[in-house]
Image: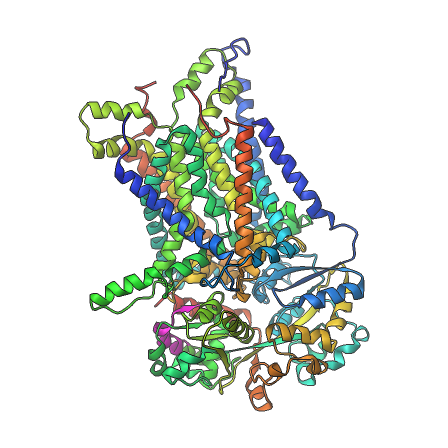
């Protein structure tokens, strides 16, 4: 027995050493990022450029990031929150201001993505990549059923839903679904009038019986496999679903549908933590990612939207033609970024959301 | 394992100070560890349930601008006045109860078989029960999505059957059925292991004696084996019901639109709504209810069947 | 010698089938020539190749293994002590402290431990995760050990004491072997809980600490590739190998010999 315990202890120690060896003393840039949100080639190139190591840890939701930071987690140099999360972080004093002199490449960003209400003057954040929340569909099936793909009605109106009952999923996010419902009703996605919210709840409840699930994680897989035919989802995910479908040799394509009523635009931004161990590396990375070629690599990898004008010449032509990734002016007007809600508004929304999901 | 009892060591009289020391040597370490790394952190969050949520997340400062202690009962009042949360609690209770019963039904034969197997096989059989659970949770759930998917054998058979009965086809995936199956699947080893640990100790001669006295198989099970196994049953039930009550990952991944459980609501408080005090309140209520149920079940068990340890003893 | 009834075999076989069908799918799909874990396309060893080039994934798997080993050892030790203590003595505080971590939602425990570590200015990393895991595993071990004790024959221990054994010797040579299956069952549970934990680990991991569940969950939106199946299969086999080696080293580890 003692021999066994000693063996296990020795094994544990032996494994622990090489794993922690890399930690001390080297130049490390701690990036807390979404998974698959930085092309491996870009990482390599940056590591050569800065003579440092990039250590990435991942989160899959802004809220996870915010929760962890609210509890006081430290040790990250940079993270990549969406604009409304940036707003919350600025207001809670977590971010280090950016010295514009060190990010000359900021001029590459399209002006309409700069100086937003989230971060006036871009004091703390710099745009990184974008996505929209739109409709994804199985081309073959939806054409067969003759359903429109350019309106939220196909997700909310029972007259369309009956044809796809049980084959539709919507995102499991109160903010996203309310935004879609509000847009469908003709309001702004950032509308906070409780009466309008009640209308949105009514729309959602009417459509709910036809939906297969509220799902933010496995819906892409189901879409690609062909079990689900219509989704309310993120443009990057839907793009990926099509890549997977083609790779798997399916007869159908997965296409993106931009609703004419408008949709939610999510701009993810690079920010530096106030107590970052290596803010110098962080700012180097920021400027590096604002270069056209580096920024384009991500778009080419996952089909994300790109606010960088210098990136255009590096992006694959078929992506440039895709209106869901690079919307034209008319569509762009209808896209809205979500604002962070006040505490009271969040609570009300959660009460309504719990009611919807409790099946009342 | 030849273990010689050392007759030449300490006197047969158990001296009082040594007994006390012995008690603290055994109670001490786990007590200190849990006080430090569980009780204190949890008390921080219990305190949080009386605080105001921070405007952008987390908690508002403990002392407001005027320097006064900012504690209130708002979050508790919300819980008790908005009934939707109680409804979700009830739903979770049923799911957890059903999961526990199904686990018991499935685990008992497994544990019994392993316990009755020859000693040299028992370890292997036990390992085989737990081996699947050393692979990642998420992909096992994904495997269930494949099994229950509309194009797979199971769903097609079920729907074919329903079709012959003239009924509408059902989706096995994204439904309460899928959630339950996965709940049972994920918790099964936590019922098997305690049951096994208990059943393994049962003396077969008891059952032989009962058989000689004319008891049939069912009577032998119900009046001897089952009562003796009750401590294992309760241990297993606690280790299944309590975690199942608070789970959120399974409904998130393959639940239907109506399958939101209290675990999901709590997660939303900490993540989407960023209302930590309310999340704490829900968590505290969940914990208290779960522990109360466990305590109640144990009490009922002790009352209705007497102390199981007095049932053995005739054999040696 | 009583025969085991047929229905017991059938029911147990059904139980094993229930446990193994999903696992077979997991293993088989690690050879699946498709990025998705959704349906069978063709055979390939690609994913295993990719896995061995994926330093992050391998490091995450290694971290998970180390943490699980440490956590299960420590929590088995502490949990057995707690289980014995709860059985033998009339205690009020310890049972509550032991049982509550099982009941409390993981998110609450994760957030509270994070706040606690931050207050103490304790650097987050592998150690903070291990500490957290031990805290919630103790209860599982304690419950199993206690229930095993409850079904145990006291007279043997009493006999040992009457014959002059010290309490420690009575425990070590009589009680401990008798409860060993319970201790092992608890250790196995603790290991399983630790190696697959996500929520608590998420909150208590440091800036460079990734465990396998953290790595995998972060992939959840971009589809969990068969690399995950591959690493899971390997980790499972590795753990199995460790157990087999352990049982060779300590032949009496899993059995409770009292004859």
Instruction: Write down the region rendered in magenta.
Output: A201-214
| Image x and y of residue A162, in percent | 33, 79
- Number of marks present in the image shown: 0
- Vertical side of C208 occupied by A122: above or below: below
| Image x and y of residue B40, in percent | 57, 45
- Is residue A272 shown to the viewer in this render? no
Residue extending furthest front?
Answer: C43
| Image x and y of residue B312, in percent | 32, 24
Q: Is residue A146 left or right of residue A35?
A: left
The quarter holding residue A204 reads: bottom left
Residue extending furthest left?
Answer: B214
The quarter holding residue B305 reads: top left
Residue visible at 75% across and 67% down in the picture: A45
- Is residue B305 shown to the viewer in this render? yes
| Image x and y of residue C53, in percent | 65, 56
Q: Quadrant of the N terminus of chain A?
A: top right
């Amino acid at each position: 027995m003692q021999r066994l315990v000693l063996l296990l202890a020795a094994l544990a120690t032996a494994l622990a050493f090489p794993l922690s060896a890399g930690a001390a003393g080297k130049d490390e840039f701690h990036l807390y990022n979404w998974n698959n949100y930085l092309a491996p080639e870009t990482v390599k190139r940056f590591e050569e450029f800065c003579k440092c190591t990039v250590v990435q840890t991942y989160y899959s939701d802004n809220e996870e990031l915010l929760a962890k930071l609210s509890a006081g987690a430290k040790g990250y140099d940079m993270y990549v929150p969406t604009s409304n999360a940036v707003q919350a972080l600025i207001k809670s004093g977590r971010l280090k201001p950016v010295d514009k002199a060190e990010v000359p490449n900021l001029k590459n960003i399209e002006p309409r993505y700069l100086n937003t209400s989230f971060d006036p003057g871009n004091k703390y954040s710099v745009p990184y990549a974008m996505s929209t929340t739109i409709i994804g569909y199985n081309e073959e099936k939806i054409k067969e059923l003759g359903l429109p793909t350019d309106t939220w009605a196909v997700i909310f109106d029972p007259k369309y839903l009956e044809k796809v009952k049980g084959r539709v999923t919507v995102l499991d996010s109160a903010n996203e679904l309310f935004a879609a419902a509000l847009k469908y009703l003709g309001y702004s996605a950032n509308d906070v009038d409780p009466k309008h919210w009640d209308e949105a709840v009514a729309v959602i409840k009417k459509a709910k019986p036809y939906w297969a699930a509220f799902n933010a994680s496995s819906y892409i897989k189901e879409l690609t496999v062909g079990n689900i035919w219509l989704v309310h989802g993120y443009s990057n995910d839907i793009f990926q679903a099509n890549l997977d479908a083609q790779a798997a040799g399916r007869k159908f394509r997965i296409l993106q549908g931009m609703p004419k009523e408008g949709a939610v635009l999510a701009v993810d931004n690079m920010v530096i933590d106030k107590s970052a161990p290596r803010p110098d590396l962080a700012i180097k990375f920021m400027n590096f990612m604002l270069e056209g070629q580096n920024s384009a690599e991500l778009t080419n990898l996952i089909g994300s939207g790109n606010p960088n004008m210098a990136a255009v010449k590096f992006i694959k032509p078929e992506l440039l033609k895709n209106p869901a990734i690079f919307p034209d002016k008319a569509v762009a007007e209808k896209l809205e970024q979500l604002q962070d809600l006040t505490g009271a508004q969040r609570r009300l929304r959660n009460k309504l959301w719990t009611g919807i999901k409790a099946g009342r | 394992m030849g273990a010689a009892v050392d007759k030449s060591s300490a006197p047969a009289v158990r001296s009082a100070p040594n007994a006390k020391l012995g008690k603290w040597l055994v109670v001490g370490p786990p007590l200190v560890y849990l006080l430090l790394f569980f009780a204190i952190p949890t008390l921080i969050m219990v305190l949080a349930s009386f605080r105001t949520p921070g405007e952008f997340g987390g908690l508002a400062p403990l002392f407001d601008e005027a320097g006064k202690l900012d504690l209130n009962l708002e979050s508790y009042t919300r819980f008790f006045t908005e009934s939707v949360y109680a409804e979700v609690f009830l739903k979770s209770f049923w799911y957890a109860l059903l999961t526990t019963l199904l686990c018991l039904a499935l685990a008992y034969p497994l544990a019994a078989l392993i316990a009755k197997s020859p000693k040299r096989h028992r370890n292997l059989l036990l390992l085989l029960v737990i081996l699947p659970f050393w692979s990642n949770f998420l992909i096992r759930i994904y495997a269930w999505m494949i099994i229950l998917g509309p194009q797979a054998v199971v769903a097609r058979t079920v729907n074919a059957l329903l079709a012959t009965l003239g009924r509408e086809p059902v989706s096995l995936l994204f439904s309460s059925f899928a959630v339950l199956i996965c709940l049972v699947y994920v918790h099964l080893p936590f019922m098997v292991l305690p049951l096994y640990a208990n059943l393994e100790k049962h003396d077969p001669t008891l059952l032989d004696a009962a058989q000689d006295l004319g008891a049939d198989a069912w009577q032998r099970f119900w009046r001897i084996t089952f009562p003796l196994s009750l401590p294992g049953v309760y241990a297993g039930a606690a280790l299944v019901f309590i975690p199942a009550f608070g789970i959120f990952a399974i409904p998130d991944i393959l639940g239907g639109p109506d399958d939101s459980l209290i675990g999901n609501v709590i997660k939303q408080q900490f993540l989407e709504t960023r209302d930590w005090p309310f999340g704490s309140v829900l968590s505290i209520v969940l914990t208290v209810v779960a522990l109360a149920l466990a305590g109640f079940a144990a009490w009922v068990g002790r009352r209705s069947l007497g102390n199981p340890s007095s049932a053995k003893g005739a054999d040696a | 010698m009583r025969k085991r009834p047929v229905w017991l075999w059938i029911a147990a076989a059904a139980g094993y089938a229930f446990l193994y069908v999903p696992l077979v799918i997991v293993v088989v799909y690690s050879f699946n020539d498709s990025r998705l874990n959704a349906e069978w396309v063709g055979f390939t060893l690609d994913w295993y190749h990719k896995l061995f080039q994926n330093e992050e994934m391998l490091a995450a798997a290694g971290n998970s293994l180390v943490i699980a080993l440490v956590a299960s050892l420590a929590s088995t030790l502490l949990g057995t002590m707690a289980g014995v203590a709860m059985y033998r003595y009339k205690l009020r505080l310890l049972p509550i402290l032991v049982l509550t971590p099982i009941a409390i939602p993981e998110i609450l425990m994760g957030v509270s431990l994070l706040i606690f570590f931050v207050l103490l200015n304790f650097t987050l990393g592998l150690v903070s995760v291990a500490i957290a895991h031990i805290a919630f595993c103790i209860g599982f071990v304690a419950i199993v050990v206690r229930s095993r004790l409850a079904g145990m024959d006291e007279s043997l221990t009493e006999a040992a004491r009457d014959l002059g054994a010290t309490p420690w010797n009575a425990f070590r040579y009589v009680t401990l072997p008798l409860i060993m299956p319970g201790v092992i069952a608890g250790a196995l549970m603790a290991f399983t809980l630790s190696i697959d934990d996500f929520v608590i680990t998420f909150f208590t991991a440091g800036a460079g600490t990734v465990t396998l569940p953290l790595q995998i969950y972060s992939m959840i939106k971009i589809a969990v590739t068969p690399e995950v199946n591959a690493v899971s299969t390997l980790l499972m086999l590795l753990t199995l190998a460790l157990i087999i080696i352990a049982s060779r080293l300590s032949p009496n580890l899993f059995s409770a010999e009292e004859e």
